[in-house]
Image (cartoon, helix red, strand yellow):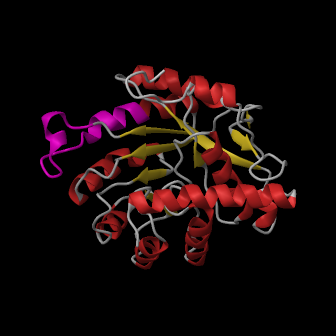
Amino acid sequence: MSGPVWMSAISGIDLALWDIKGKVANLPVFELLGGKFRDRIEVYTHFKAETPEESARQARHWVDRGFKGLKTGARPGGAGQSSQYMGNCDPQATAAHFAAVRAEVGADVKLLVDCHGRFSVANCVRLGRALEPYDLYVLEDPVPPDDLSAYPKVRREVPIPIMGSERLNTKSQYRQLLDLDGVDVAQPDLMYAGGITEVRKIATFADIFQVPLSMYNTKGPVGILAAAHLMASIPNVAPMEFVTGIDWRDEILTEPLRVEDGCVVLPEAPGFGVELDMEGVEKHRWRVGNPR
């Protein structure tokens, strides 16, 4: 049995059990997974603006704060954005943003573009060729992941490495995508793909194909640290997603997440190394009719 709802439920149970086991054994989860290759996980964050000039300013802001990777979405093509086929991306507009950002931050910062799985193969090819001069690190989720065979079609024609997809939620789907040579970077979501137990298997499949993992993560602090423990314990890693500007995230912890020089620092305490501040949790608890 699979599917996003079922696998998300399994993910929550799986992560809870790994944390419990680590605390009972008085060991951090990365030790339960065989030890660590690294004690910090490189992350990237995001910029989003209406003009290339503002994109460049935002990019400079985050690079000055230590981030070495930045992502934004492809610009939708006006009224065509509602259709997968009718010119649903604007390659030149997207290229203008990346030209401004690359000129601002230089050659050493990793730049990523996210297509959100909404473009056709032909439009992804147009977009990828327009972005070629700006040396992007990856092009994420170029096509809807329902048809895995579309990924290698894009990958053969686009001069940018292909990454995907957080929408896949089983090891079998990832094995098929890797068999098809569909991606250069695998991007599972630990919260949707069965937790550490399942995603560790995905990592092993990917390693066989010499494909690194870049963990998709827009979730809360427990999910971020769970992903960091897994990323620390495997050899084949790429920078992990990290969403900035979430003020409540540290408020629900007894100690805030440590993000230094563009990296999440791995806790050494038992389990995931995180404890919830229940007063903070209560403050931000969702309530029907009164969200805050």
Image quarter of residue 155: bottom left
Percent x, y of residue 250: 67, 29
Q: In which quarter of the image is the N terminus?
A: bottom left
Q: Which residue of the protein is positioned furthest toward the right in this rendering? A: 26
> Please, is residue 183 above or below residue 70 in the view?
below
Q: Can residue 188 be seen in this view?
A: no
Q: Can residue 89 be seen in this view?
A: yes
Percent x, y of residue 247: 59, 24
> Please, is residue 9 above or below residue 220 in the view?
below
Percent x, y of residue 222: 64, 44
Q: Is residue 86 magenta?
A: yes
Query: What range of the chain is rendered magenta?
Result: 76-98
Percent x, y of residue 207: 61, 73
Give the left or right position of residue 273, taking residue 14 as reference. Answer: right
Give the left or right position of residue 177, taking residue 30 as reference. Answer: left
Residue at the (74%, 50%) spot, across then down: 272
- Residue situated in front as seen by the camera: 126 or 283: 283
- Residue situated in front as seen by the camera: 62 or 95: 62
Give the left or right position of residue 105, taking residue 112 as reference. Answer: right
Q: How many labels does the image show?
A: 0
Give the left or right position of residue 178, taking residue 80 as reference. Answer: right
Residue at the (45%, 43%) spot, across then down: 134
- Residue situated in front as seen by the camera: 263 or 159: 263
Q: Is residue 286 magenta?
A: no
